[in-house]
């Protein structure tokens, strides 16, 4: 994976395995690249954007052409300060409610319809003009085109080979390729952020949990193992009863060959222990059971428990340009309501998404028997996820409210939400309104020492 500003290049999935694993490599099936140079030349052409999205708008004119994304800093933005809304004068074109959703159901996910039905008097979806604001650093685009020719999946889709950037399959041929695009997508290389995760009870009561996270891709740390994707550290800063607890993850690419390694430091016990349950459907940190470990970032981790089907493309109303949710004049109580977020601060737009269905394999275990992911074509970010239980009933609905950190050209989320349709509880994750200043540090300088189990105690000192 190639860093933007020099540094080490890693060919993801080309493993130099530990002794004793040679026999495992012998059974790896490598999928040959399906794109020729001529096919890859479509990237950045009049047909496709540099990341593989359709450049043109739709026939109805409700989705515009992509013209490069948001490239100029908006008026009022001050370097190092909170982001400002680049579209302050935009007004809703119309609003989708429980009373009129039938008019728009072709552009809604089953989960979104279920939310409207679950909260008919309070939840609504204000729809705005579509702004194709997403842009990645220009210097990454050439590498994306090269990967389109060389990238391969290995071991039945569980690993990658010959990938030197953050986008292995800009012209995907399968569901697992779309998911790998999401998992490996560019998020700044190395970043630190602080935010609130808020488990909300059915009666609307909540107590924020403040999380301090570091995410560093392996190419930022020379000497990282070839199968390493990134390093992740998450420390709880509040409330007091949880303060000091820290999670450390060494995220591998092929987790069938080499499972994710995770450790936790418990401040009360003052000890570090291995955490094998920080994967798959293990409970997410301090989430009150409202998300699984592999729900974070809408989906993360090993894909091996599911069969992945590429359903196709769809035009969907998805959360986008969610700058209102970052407004520092708002409190958490302004935004977080009983059952859902305050629709006054939501923004939905019509965008094209890739639709991928994940079905639990025979003999595998997970609390979600089926998951449908809707992946934004302009960012490769999962933006809506419908999650089904073992009976095939729609259980949870997750949405990611997309936003671009335009000063560094990093599309990401303003926040993620998880809605439990049965209990009426929900979980917003990513709010920073009551925290001072801009809570992201880009190009965050770290050393390997910060991502060792021994570092957990230091990170958790109160």
Image (cartoon, grey):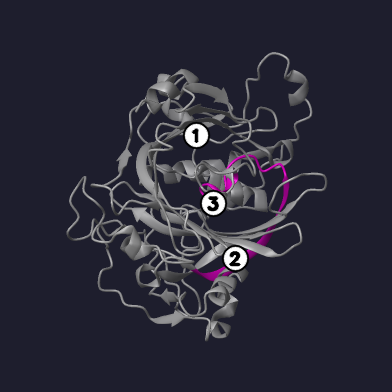
The residue pinned by badge 1 equals 1
Q: Where does the image place residue 41, in percent across and percent down from the top left?
A: 52, 51
**What whole-number distance in Å separates the C-alpha atoms at marks 2 and 1?**
39 Å
Question: Which range is magenta?
Answer: 294-317
Q: Which mark is residue 421?
A: 2
Asked if residue 273 lies left or right of residue 137, the reply is right
* Dot placed on the residue nearer the N-terminal end, 1 or 3: 1
Quarter the C terminus occupies: top left
Is residue 11 within the magenta segment?
A: no
Asked if residue 66 lies left or right of residue 276, the reply is left
Does the rendering let one see residue 413? Answer: no
Callout 3: SS? loop
In the depicted structure, whether residue 399 falls above or below residue 297: below
**Picture mark count:** 3
The residue pinned by badge 3 equals 298
Does the rendering let one see residue 3? Answer: yes
**What whole-number distance in Å separates the C-alpha atoms at marks 2 and 3?**
17 Å
* Dot placed on the residue nearer the N-terminal end, 2 or 3: 3
**Which numbered disc, 1 or 3, marks the residue closer to the eye?**
3
């Amino acid at each position: 994976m190639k860093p933007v500003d020099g540094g080490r290049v890693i060919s993801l999935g080309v493993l130099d395995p530990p002794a004793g694993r040679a026999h495992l490599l012998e059974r790896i099936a490598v999928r040959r690249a399906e794109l020729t140079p001529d096919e890859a030349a479509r990237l950045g052409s009049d047909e496709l954007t540099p990341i593989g999205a359709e450049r043109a708008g739709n026939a109805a004119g409700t989705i515009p052409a992509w013209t490069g994304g948001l490239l100029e800093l908006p008026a009022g933005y001050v370097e190092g300060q909170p982001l400002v809304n680049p579209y302050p004068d935009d007004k809703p074109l119309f609003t989708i409610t429980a009373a009129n959703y039938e008019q728009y159901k072709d552009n809604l996910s089953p989960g979104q319809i279920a939310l409207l039905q679950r909260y008919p008097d309070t939840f609504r979806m204000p729809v705005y003009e579509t702004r194709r604001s997403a842009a990645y650093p220009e210097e990454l685009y050439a590498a994306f085109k090269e990967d389109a020719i060389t990238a391969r999946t290995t071991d039945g889709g569980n690993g990658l080979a010959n990938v030197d950037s953050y986008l292995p399959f800009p012209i995907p041929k399968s569901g697992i390729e779309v998911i790998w695009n999401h998992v490996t997508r560019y998020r700044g290389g190395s970043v630190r952020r602080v935010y609130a995760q808020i488990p909300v009870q059915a009666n609307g009561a909540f107590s924020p949990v403040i999380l301090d996270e570091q995410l560093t891709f392996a190419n930022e740390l020379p000497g990282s193992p070839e199968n390493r994707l990134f390093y992740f550290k998450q420390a709880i800063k509040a409330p007091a009863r949880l303060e000091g607890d820290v999670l450390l993850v060494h995220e591998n690419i092929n987790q069938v060959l080499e499972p994710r390694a995770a450790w936790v430091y418990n401040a009360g016990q003052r000890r570090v222990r291995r955490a094998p349950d920080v994967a798959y459907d293990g409970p997410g940190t301090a989430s009150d059971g409202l998300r699984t470990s592999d729900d974070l970032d809408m989906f993360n981790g090993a894909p091996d428990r599911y069969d992945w089907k590429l359903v196709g493309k769809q035009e969907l109303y998805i959360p986008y340009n969610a700058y209102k949710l970052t407004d520092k004049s708002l409190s958490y109580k302004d935004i977080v309501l009983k059952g859902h977020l305050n629709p006054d601060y939501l923004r939905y737009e019509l965008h094209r998404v890739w639709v991928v269905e994940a079905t639990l394999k025979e003999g595998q275990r997970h609390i979600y028997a089926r998951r449908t992911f809707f992946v934004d074509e302009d960012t490769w970010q999962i933006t809506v996820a419908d999650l089904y239980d073992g009976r095939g009933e729609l259980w949870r609905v997750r949405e990611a409210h997309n936003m671009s950190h335009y000063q560094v050209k990093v599309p990401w989320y303003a926040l993620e939400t998880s809605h439990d349709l049965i209990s009426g509880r929900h979980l917003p994750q990513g709010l920073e309104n009551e925290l001072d200043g801009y809570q992201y540090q880009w190009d965050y300088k770290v050393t390997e020492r910060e991502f060792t189990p021994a570092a957990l105690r230091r990170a958790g000192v109160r």
